[in-house]
Amino acid sequence: MPHPQQQAVLTAAGIHKRFGALVVLDAVDFAMAADEAVGIVGPNGAGKTTLLSVLSGAFPPTAGTVSFKGGDVTSLPATQRCRLGLVRTHQVPKPFSGMTTFENVFVAASHGAGLGRDEAYEEALGSLKLCGMLGVANRRAETLGLLDRKRLELARALAARPTLLLLDEIGGGLTDGEAGELVGTIKELRRRKIGIVWIEHIVHILLQVAERLICMDAGKIIADGEPQAVMADPEVVRAYLGGGPK
């Protein structure tokens, strides 16, 4: 949880999420300050991506509330949360095909951030530059390789002017070298005071950015705190390796 002296910018209280009879999130409480970098880890099926979807507005919770910047956003769709500065990337990048890299980012700036044409143009250029994408700005997005599609996903999110950025396995499928390049970009976002919530299976990469680590298992948060302490927690070890009582 945020330090007692830090005011939470994002809070989720008593979050439950069911899909039919399947309970995916079970009474999850989460809060973070605007300038935090929080990593979320856990085995497959732990509920990590579903939590991000509830926080971003892609899924409504079955029960519980989500607050952002002091206001209740539980009933707001993802588009409206994006305009408020709560922006999310996706594990599998799906750029608009038939459009260039620049056009993809321009759409994010104009519709995600609600910017006028000239301001959206400058915002798109700045986001592409930060993500090392200017060299492919005029390429069709569907022709990009995986690393550049991941960079494009990040550039689109940045063009929406996030206060808080939710990253869903943005390092997935990349080599360590490629993921390291993305880490460099994300560290620059931290220098710009953008808050980060990052789900990642490549833990050693995540730990280069995360100042606080949360571990989930079976729809619950089982550990929350300093990263090395969380990774050494016996319950976290059991969640990853199995073989012991919960």
Image: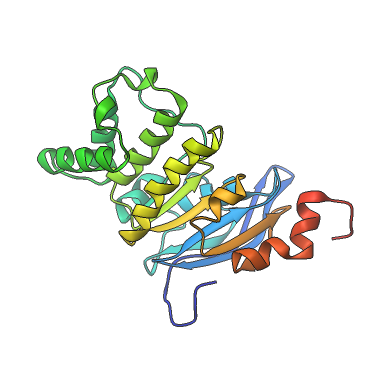
Q: Residue at x 26, y 27 (%)?
A: 135
Q: In x, y percent, where is residue 232?
A: 72, 64
Q: In x, y percent, where is residue 170?
A: 49, 40
- Which residue is most to the right? 244
Q: Residue at x 51, y 67 (%)?
A: 31
Q: Against 58, is 234 above or below?
A: below
Depth check: 42 or 207 in front?
Answer: 207
Q: Against 74, is 105 above or below?
A: above
Q: Residue at x 29, y 27 (%)?
A: 101
Q: In x, y percent, where is residue 181?
A: 42, 41
Q: In x, y percent, where is residue 174?
A: 53, 33
Depth check: 50 or 178 in front?
Answer: 178
Depth check: 83 or 108 in front?
Answer: 108
Q: Is residue 223 visible?
A: no
Q: Residue at x 60, y 45 (%)?
A: 202
Left of 233 or right of it: where is 150? left
Numbered circles on residues, count: 0
**Image color mode:** rainbow
- Which residue is most to the front? 177
Depth check: 209 or 120 in front?
Answer: 209
Instruction: Identify the image quadrant of the N terminus.
Output: bottom right
Q: Is residue 68 visible?
A: yes
Instruction: Identify the image quadrant of the C terminus.
Output: bottom right
